[in-house]
Amino acid sequence: MVKINIIYCSGTGNTEAMANLISEGAKSAGADVQLINVSDADVDKVKNADVIVLGSPAMGDEVLEEEEMEPFVENISKEVKGKKVALFGSYGWGDGQFMRDWVERMEGYGADLIGEGLIVQDAPEGETEDQCREFGKALINS
């Protein structure tokens, strides 16, 4: 059974909703999933999983959440080399540049990225809810 840790940060609840839907999809495909708020995460949560899924809202000038997620990502930079990593996040405006920057950054750390990241504008609804579930299911076959 594939062990997946979904580590996320959410300000308004949109990214948390995505995390829950991704978890639902991964569990339906047979994964052992743990949802972890970034405030409760540590390096061991990265080391002890087959797949790490990181989620953050875009903040300010399309950057990662700066108080908790940014320091966490920096802290795990050496632990993600060769590790399967997927990224997701929500944004309210802009075009999702924060995700393209995050993908590039994780590639620079040597992560084995699954896809190009999943972004949803505002809260996941309808089609984007389905996209989150499918994203979770796809983690099993990565």
Image (tube, helix red, strand yellow):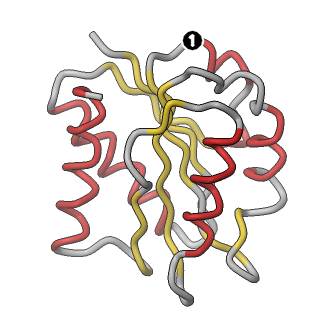
Question: Mark 1: few, some, or many residues within 10 Å (few <14, many ≥20)?
Answer: few
Quarter occupied by the C terminus: top left
Q: Residue furthest bottom?
A: 93
Residue 19 pos. (x, y %): 42, 50
Q: Residue at x 27, y 22 (%)?
A: 31
Q: Which residue is mark 1?
A: 48
Residue 57 location (% of width, % of height) = 59, 66
Examine the rendered structure and indicate whether residue 111 appears above or below residue 135. above
Task: Locate residue 74: give its quadrant.
Answer: top right
Quarter of the image holding residue 46? top right
36 or 136: nearer the viewer = 136
Q: Is residue 133 above or below residue 48?
A: below
User: At x 22% / y 60%, what residue is drawn?
Assistant: 131
Residue at 63 percent across and 56 percent down: it is 102
- The residue depicted at 44 percent of the width and 80 percent of the height is 122
Q: Is residue 70 left or right of residue 45?
A: right
Front residue (pair 20, 2): 2
Rendering coords of residue 34 (x, y %):
45, 27
Residue type at mark 1?
Asn
Find residue 58 and report its image quarter: bottom right
Q: Is residue 40 above or below residue 64?
A: above
Helix, strand or loop at disc 1?
loop
Q: Quadrant of the N terminus?
A: top left
Q: Is residue 9 left or right of residue 27?
A: right
